[in-house]
Amino acid sequence: MDSLTHALTGAIIGHALGNSKMGTKAMVIGAIAANIPDFDAAFTPFFDPVEAMFIHRGFSHSLLLMFIGSAFLGYLLSRYYKSRHPFGFWWLLVLIPWLSHLLMDIFNTYGTGILEPFSSVRISFDTMAIIDINLLVILVLTLAALLFLREKSRFQKRFIALLGLSVGLLYFLLNVYIKLSLEREVRDRLEAAGVDFTRIHSTPLPLTNLVWMVVVEDSSGYRVSQVNIIKKQIVSHTLLLKGMENNITTCSLERIKEFTKNYFTIDYSHQGYFYVNDLRFSSLESSYPAAYVLRFKIDEKNCRVERIHPRRGINPTNISKLVRKIF
């Protein structure tokens, strides 16, 4: 998820855990703690562009580092604030917001290595866009209520915080249900029509959970559609072909394939380089190659890799198109 979503969640959790003891300081600590895992972005420029993709949301997002790091920071806070609160209070004030970051990120498409270093498996449920307006509204309203009703009793404000977090949790679960239902319906329709396919991948478009990208893979390529789940209509459709990787003999693509979970296409530029495109990520763009969010540019001569900065197509024109796709 984006940094703002993490910060808002951490602030609300901090309020629920520490309001009765330390007021708004708990919200600030919670907001900071909820963004600690993404500090790995400061180190990724020092790595090869492909390996950097595995560094981000790798060990920095692991449960092991969370337990060690939160205990260490909890100890420092307990020493800084002397004996005002026990170590366990400070530990939880860092641990729970930190944990919220890890749990929220596994619902995105990128993949999160919460089991590192014991397992390199990157978990991704593909049910939440990295920026989701509905979730942001839930969190902003909750935080605004806490700040506006600051004169209310501690019990009432804690209830509001827990209520907002509960609504947010239900929203996450709703998206899991939508994904399972959507993929089941797509699978049933393909089987009923006698259409062969290998895999189905789905994820919501940025900003909303009302339009989803559905990728259907077969032996020759990928059918990529954007689907309005309310109207049950396909609002855009593209066919992307496989096979170009067979022409590449000088450069190894194994790590890129691993990162993309083998959902990729290749485009040649005829200028001495080619692109490897990750198909798992959704964009507000409808046509390709503009709709590719994550691309790797590779020089054919020396196999030098350059990662193109992610482009999700979030701009006024595409937002206007998204509204029309919804309504």
Image: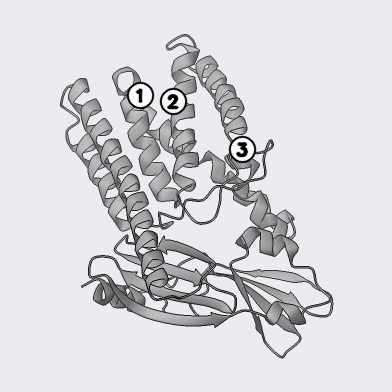
Q: Could you give the CA–CA distance between mark 1 and mark 2, rounded to whole angstroms?
A: 7 Å
Marks 1 & 3, CB-CB < 8 Å contact: no
Query: Which residue bears the numbered disc 2?
Result: 93
Q: Which sits earlier in the primary sequence, circle 1 or circle 3?
A: 1
Closer-to-camera residue (86/257):
257
Residue shown at 36% from the left, 36% from the top: 11
**Location of residue 258 in the rendering, given as x and y in whole percent from the top left corner:** 67, 59
**Mark 2 Cα shell of 10 Å, populated few (<14), some (14-19), many (≥20):** many
Query: Which residue bears the numbered disc 1?
Result: 17
What residue type is disc 1 on? Answer: Leu
Asked if residue 242 can be seen in this view, the reply is yes
Residue shown at 49% from the left, 46% from the top: 106
Element type at mark 1:
helix
What residue type is disc 2 on? Answer: Leu
**Location of residue 157 in the rendering, given as x and y in whole percent from the top left corner:** 21, 28
Marks 1 & 2, CB-CB < 8 Å contact: yes
Q: Could you give the CA–CA distance between mark 3 and mark 2, rounded to whole angstroms?
A: 22 Å
Viewer-nearest of labels 3 and 2?
3
**Location of residue 61 in the rendering, given as x and y in whole percent from the top left corner:** 58, 41
Which quarter of the rendered picture does the C terminus lie within? bottom left
Image quadrant of residue 84? top left
Q: Which sits earlier in the primary sequence, circle 1 or circle 2?
A: 1
Element type at mark 2:
helix
Left or right of residue 3: residue 23: left
How many marks on residues? Answer: 3
Element type at mark 3:
loop
Q: Which sits earlier in the primary sequence, circle 3 or circle 2?
A: 2
Residue shown at 47% from the left, 51% from the top: 125
Closer-to-camera residue (126/184):
184
Above or below for 82 versus 46: above
Extreme bottom residue here?
270
